[in-house]
Amino acid sequence: MIRAVRPAGWDALFGLLPEGRRPRQPGDKLHKLAGVLAAPDADSLYRRLVSQWTEPDALVRGGREPQGVLWDGSVAKSLPGFVERMQYLDSATYLPDDILAKVDRASMGVSLEARVPLLDHRVVEFAWRVPLSQKIRDGQGKWLLRQVLYRHVPKALIERPKSGFAVPIDRWLRGPLRDWAEDLLDESALRAEGCFDPAPIRACWAEHLSGTRNNQHRLWTVLMFQAWSRHWSQVPASTPLAA
């Protein structure tokens, strides 16, 4: 039912709310929620949350996704609680493989140590010992950390919607970046490169261009690989960077 309405339709509907109560990109979030809700179990749910392509095996020719910690049944036995298991999987995969890597690149580019204090092993150990009731209370997360912040930071700076680093890739791909993307996602180019099966990518691209769904993130992962592959395939082998 959620997916029966296009993301743009949900955005228009939420646009009726006051600006302070209006979430960012509600249509995209609702469509992702619909996919997550279709997961058969908690572990599948987590994989869908952190993945752009739910079936990467079908995307890569001859590909087989490595079965790492996200498929380890012993994790569920050790951490039967849903929230604790999600926290552990974040700590083992999403944080080091995604979020922390991005923060490092952005902050260390200006010589700023942004993540280290909260990654001190004593802080992490303490966080795992804190009861869940002091982490989530009345539907609000990071409850204990908020209580500390209230002593030093005005509430107006804390109690406000999150502001991410999203850029309008969806509109760019339908507008100024369309020719660039079409060139990289061309069926013959995909076949010549040899890594991806063109069929699901071309279907995803057509769906995005039609406005049926916003596939910006799914397409962006493929576009970045294609752009990287094309660049390095054209660099002469004698150059120092290629070596």
Image (spheres, rainbow, N blue to C red):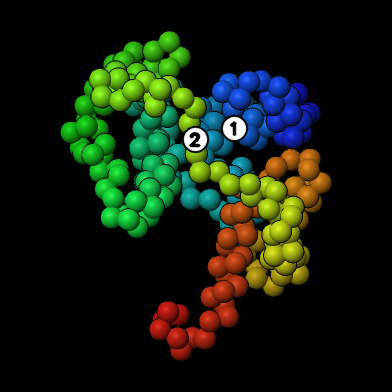
Q: Which residue position is annotated with label 2?
A: 163
Q: Image quarter for residue 199? A: bottom right
| Image side of residue 29 versus residue 73, left or right | right
Q: Residues within 10 Å of mark 2 (few under 14, many from 20)?
A: few
On residue 85, the disc is none
Which residue is at the far top?
138
Extreme residue toward the bottom, this view? 238
Callout 1 crowding tier (Cα within 10 Å): few <14, some 14–19, many ≥20: some
Disc 1 and disc 2 in contact, CB within 8 angstroms: yes
* Amino acid at pointer 1: Arg
Image quarter for residue 74? Answer: top left
Residue 146 image point, x, y percent: 33, 21
Helix or strand or loop: what does disc 1 sit on? loop
Quarter that holds the N terminus: top right
Circle on res. 24:
1
* Residue drawn at x 61%, y 42% as measured from the top left: 54
Quadrant location of the C terminus in the rendered image? bottom left
- The outermost residue toward the right is 210
Q: Position of residue 9 (x, y in %)?
A: 76, 30
Decide: is 235 above or below 155. Answer: below
- Decide if residue 130 is on the left or right side of residue 239: left
Q: Residue at (40%, 35%) from the top-left corner?
A: 89
